[in-house]
Image: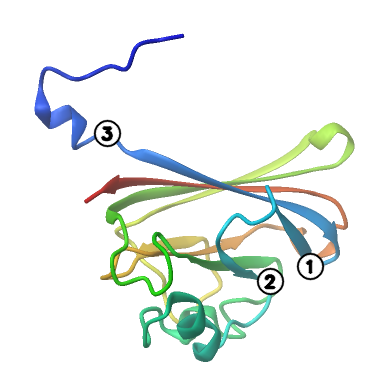
Amino acid sequence: MTAPLFYWNEKHSKSQPRILELCYSITAGKTVSPLPQGADSLYSFDTITQAQLDAYTGTASEFAAASFDATSMGTDAFGGVVRMSGSPSLYAQGFSLMKMEAKLMSGTGFGTIAERGALGATGLTASTLESACSMSTLGNFGFKLLLSGLDALTSGLIIVRFYWISK
């Protein structure tokens, strides 16, 4: 067992990101199951409506549905929202979202790997098929992934890592 490390320079402790990892097991074409069960996120391969976004976050228009419209969630897209607190999300933990890394593992022994990434400062673009991430003004995360061949997979693993700084 390793003892916790406390930085002597206080600037390091506020500049080192935490990592939130979400895993989704692909169980059929355009169907996933979170690993472990109960991991909290709203996710989809298809359009996510404003009503769905608002119901999940417990807020009004925290994320624009245009970021998850039919164009944004087109062929080989996967995306969603991660609530960083309980419901509603008025007191989320996020202060800064630095980047997102995503990995798609498929094939025998998950030997076929495709990776994508995005900077948090770039944000989500409305009606754009892209790999991107953003943090809302309330500290919750939105993400979209564009991974070639994703829609055709019937098994595999999607891993999404968010590198973020807490309030």
Q: Name the residue under label 3.
A: 16
Residue 45 - label: 2
The CA span between labels 3 and 2 is 32 Å
Q: In which quarter of the image is residue 120?
A: bottom left
SS at circle 2: loop
Label 1 – label 3 distance at C-alpha: 35 Å
Question: Which numbered disc flags the more N-terminal residue, 1 or 3?
Answer: 3
- 42 is higher (above) or lower (below) than 20: below
Left-right relation of 31 to 94 = right
Camera-side residue of 20 and 119: 20
For the residues labelled 1 and 2, the Cα–Cα distance comes to 6 Å
Percent across and percent down for residue 140 are: 37, 64
Residue at 75% x, 60% y: name it.
32
Q: Name the residue under label 1.
A: 30
Residue 78 percent coordinates (x, y): 64, 65
Say which of marks 3 and 2 sits in front: 3
Q: Does residue 107 appear left or right of residue 135 in this picture?
A: right
**Residue placed at 44% from the left, 64% from the top?**
83
The reply to whether discs 1 and 2 touch (Cβ–Cβ < 8 Å) is yes
**Amino acid bearing label 1:** Lys
Q: What amino acid does circle 2 point to? A: Phe
- Do residues under tags 1 and 3 come within 8 Å of each other at their CB atoms? no
In the foreground, 124 or 20: 20
The label shown at residue 87 is none
Find numbered disc 3 in the image and state the secondary structure of the residue it sits on: loop
- Residue depicted at 79% across the width and 55% down the height: 26
Q: Residue at x 39, y 61 (%)?
A: 85
Q: Please give left or right for residue 158 compared with residue 145 in the image.
A: right
Helix, strand or loop at mark 1: loop
Q: Where is residue 117 in the image (x, y as percent from the top left)?
A: 49, 49
